[in-house]
Amino acid sequence: MVNYGNSIYELIITNKRLLLYARRGLIFKKDDLIAMKISDIQNIMYREEGLISKKGVLLIDLLNRRISLYGRAKDMKAAYQNIMSRWG
């Protein structure tokens, strides 16, 4: 699970895309999906914040914007390594 903006998403990494997926709504369910092409990634950085409870931060520069994903340090580091293996 990652935080993007003010929402929580599941991060799905495929060979061609990064997908942020969430199922929203209590009664009337709807899917919330954000897709980014891995080929559009210009730069990717990983860092950790916090002293006691570490938070991992992925900064991804795309062709036209920068996105920041936050989550548990262990999960974000694994996501970074997975993206790097597919991007490079």
Image (cartoon, helix red, strand yellow):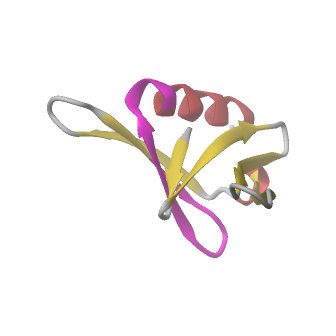
The x and y percentages for residue 79 are: 58, 32
**In the figure, 76 relative to 3: above or below?**
above
Quarter of the N terminus within the rendering: top right
Magenta segment's dominant SS is: strand
Membership of 74 in magenta stretch: yes
Membership of 87 in magenta stretch: no
**In the figure, 70 relative to 29: above or below?**
above
Residue 39 or 32: which is nearer the viewer? 32
Residue 6 or 37: which is nearer the viewer? 6
57 with respect to 82 (left or right):
left
The x and y percentages for residue 76 are: 49, 34
Residue at image location 55% in from the left, 34% down from the top? 80
Residue 82 or 69: which is nearer the viewer? 69
The x and y percentages for residue 84 are: 62, 35
- The part of the chain drawn in magenta is 58-75
38 with respect to 11 (left or right):
right
